[in-house]
Amino acid sequence: MSGTIDILSIEDEADIRELLTITLEAEGFRVLSAATGEQGLQMARAENPALILMDLMLPNISGLEICRQIRADPEISAVPILMLTAKGTETDKVVGLEMGADDYVIKPFSPRELTARVKALLRRSRATAVPEQKSDRYDRGGLSIDFDTYEVRVRGQRVELSLREFELIRFFVLHPNRVYNRGQLLDLVWGSETHVEPRTVDVHIRRLRRHIEVDDSSPSRIVTVRGVGYMFDDREIAETG
């Protein structure tokens, strides 16, 4: 691995912090550890890590609240977040994704699964930072996307997206007016190396819509094609833009 990649671990259990450090340092990463949410937020802002590993259940300030604050901070809003949780219900997963997590691993986890998830998120983060396309921006119907800086604005107002949300809207605007089902979106946006449920697509679509829809009177940018999947309707945007 060329260069040192910093990963921030926010975990209150000392034995798990140690396991995370040993596992990831064996893969060549530099691991920064925080035992509390408050300390984790401070380190995230000071160190600007390449990825954050975060426990859902933390004392004083929860992992969900940390997610919310990270996504609201322009300086660190794009950092990928991998949620670690002992809870395995669908509700817990959905809430974590709604608050801005990019992926999740359920405890107890295997070191191999953890490193695979970490590397997958980092690969996608690098691919997003240096997109492979001719145009370096999208600007239509009040929606402006800069692919070089991954800055997104709606009618001039900047909106903060997570890495996965940006990857999703980037994919849609580069492949407009075509319907993709959940399985295709998982393969094309999440990548085949990341094992997530189709429900994850619905959660991210819903969250993305809240960020980029102009108002209730405007046509939806991301259209649900019932029984099939989703489509970015660039034709509607062109007519109203």
Image: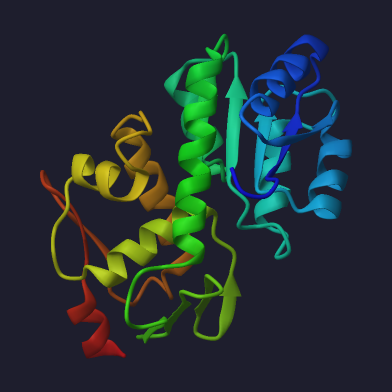
Residue, x 48% and y 20% (percent of image)? Answer: 113
Q: Which is more toward the observer, 151 or 232? A: 151
Dividing the picture into quadrants, the one containing residue 143 is bottom left
Residue, x 23% and y 77% (percent of image)? Answer: 234
Residue, x 41% and y 69% (percent of image)? Answer: 213
Left or right: where 5 falls relative to 171: right
Does residue 152 lie above or below 208 as drawn?
below
Left or right: where 116 falls relative to 225: right
As drawn, the residue found furthest toward the front would be 2
Residue, x 11% and y 47% (percent of image)? Answer: 228
Where residue 124 appears, as percent x and y from the top left, is 45, 50
Q: Is residue 221 visible?
A: no
Where residue 129 appears, as percent x and y from the top left, is 51, 64
Where residue 123 appears, as percent x and y from the top left, is 47, 47
Where residue 98 appears, as percent x and y from the top left, is 51, 42
Does residue 204 lie above or below 237 as drawn?
above
